[in-house]
Image (tube, rainbow, N blue to C red):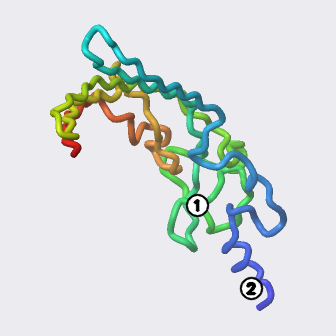
Amino acid sequence: DQYDRDLYIQTFFAGLGGTDGSDDWYGFLPYSIDDQFKLHGRYTIEKWNDVYVTGFFNWASGYHYNRRGFQNLYGDYLTFSNNPWFDGAVTPVDGQDFTEEDGLARGIISGSSFWSLDLTIGKVFSLGKGMDLELRGAFFNVLNDQTPLTRQDKAVASFDTPLARQFPRSGTVFVRLSF
């Protein structure tokens, strides 16, 4: 009876930091980044009757992630692959043997760095009597960088394949009447 209770508790915590310590529980948080750089600027072109141009550049190091194993009790991919687990706690995947020897702790894998450049051009027209009309065009991800942002992190055959990429190049038109 005591054995069954202990086994249930061990299975309950299997791969989630364990009952004997917190090995691999600490580490980089999944989808956190180490470094980020942002640059924003605006320039008014007086020769073009005060047309303005703005730019926004964003660069970030890749997101951290780790391979997550399946935890039967919770029915989801919650475990860290380097944690010791107990019989019946982790479901194997055909063709891939993810075990504690794989050495993948929390957040140990880093994805590719990514960046984007957004530009805006616009002009404000004075209509008189305190009324202004602003016309603006905004262009996002101007150079169309499509770096993968997230990857499959579950211990399945498609592990590490891209799940989401940066949004492709796009644009918007903006009109505002102020009075």
Residue at 42% x, 23% y is 42
Q: Quadrant of residue 169?
A: top left
Q: In which quarter of the view is residue 157 placed? A: top left
Q: Residue at x 61, y 45 (%)?
A: 66
From the top left corner, tell me how far across and down residue 118 is, in percent.
37, 26
Placement of 42 over or under 66, stated as above or below: above
Mark 2 is surrounded, within 10 Å at the Cα level, by few (under 14), some (14 to 19) or many (20 or more) other residues, namely few
Give the vertical position of 169 relative to 51 (above or below): below
For the residue pair 124 and 167, the one nearer the viewer reads as 124
Percent across and percent down for residue 162 are 42, 37
- Say which mark, if any, is on residue 5: 2
| Label 2 residue SS | helix
Query: Gap between marks 2 and 1, in whole Å?
Result: 22 Å
Q: Is residue 94 left or right of residue 101?
A: left
At horizontal 41% and vertical 23% (from top left) the residue drawn is 55
Q: Residue at x 33, y 35 (%)?
A: 167
Q: Are marks 2 and 1 in contact (CB under 8 Å)?
A: no
Depth check, front residue: 146 or 39: 39
Specify the amino acid type for callout 2.
Answer: Arg
Q: Residue 164 in the image: state x and y as whole percent.
A: 39, 40
Left or right position of 52 against 36: left
Residue named by callout 1: 78
Q: Nearer the viewer, mark 2 or mark 1?
A: 1
User: Where 139 falls versus 159 (above or below)?
Assistant: above
